[in-house]
Image: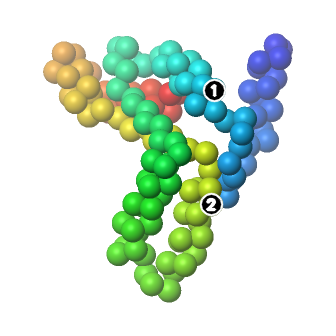
Amino acid sequence: MSATTTNVKEAIINRRSIRKVKKNDNITKERLNEVLKTALHAPTSFNMQSGRVVVVMDDQHERFWDIVKETLRSRVPEESFAATVERLQGFRDGVGTILFFENQETIEQMQEKAPSYKEQFPYWSHQGSAML
């Protein structure tokens, strides 16, 4: 195995969910741009490239989590809201937030171009987003 394969294997085996993140000086805008440029090469069925990535950092990152908190205020029972705020603060304390979503217009265009595969494009889009 190559060093890269071993590192990926170790990363998969040793991965953990981290809900309280901290600012890390090693995560820079330049490093994120490098990673995102690489991610853009992730393959997709029919090369549809329906996945999208939005990165928010600095003040925009903090504002994003403030919006999430205020949105959840009306949806989470009052007795559970303090725990929700604590969890959200754990995310807000990070360097930035990366949001992944799928462009539905792209999927619909592909369905029109290749109608015999119409039912498969939403599934393929999810798979492409996972690789992204």
Relative image position of residue 94 (x, y in whole percent): 62, 50
Q: Nearer the viewer, residue 106 or 85?
A: 85
Q: Is residue 112 left or right of residue 13?
A: left
Please tell me the numbered disc located at residue 90: 2
Res 15 seen here: yes
Q: Residue at x 77, y 18 (%)?
A: 4
Q: Height in image: 66 above or below 84?
A: above
How many angstroms separate mark 2 from mark 1 (CA)?
Answer: 22 Å
* N-terminal-most mark, 2 or 1: 1
Q: Amino acid at mark 1?
A: Arg
How is the protein colored in the picture?
rainbow
Left or right: residue 46 versus residue 97 is left
**At 47% from the left edge and 42% from the top edge, which residue is drawn?**
56
Amino acid at dot 2: Gly
- Left or right: 25 with respect to 51? right
Residue that carries the numbered disc 1 in the rendered image: 31
Q: Is residue 115 visible?
A: no
Name the outermost residue toward the front: 59
Q: Assign the N terminus to one quadrant of the image.
A: top right
**With respect to residue 18, does 66 lie above or below?**
below
Q: Quadrant of residue 104?
A: top left
Q: Secondary structure at mark 1?
A: helix
Residue 100: percent from left, percent from top:
44, 38
Q: Residue at x 45, y 84 (%)?
A: 78
Which quadrant of the figure has residue 72? bottom left
- Looking at the rendered image, the disc whose residue lies closer to the viewer, 2 or 1, is 1
| Secondary-structure class at tag 2 | helix
Q: What residue is at 27 percent from the left and 28 percent from the top?
A: 107
Above or below, 114 against 122 in this view is: above
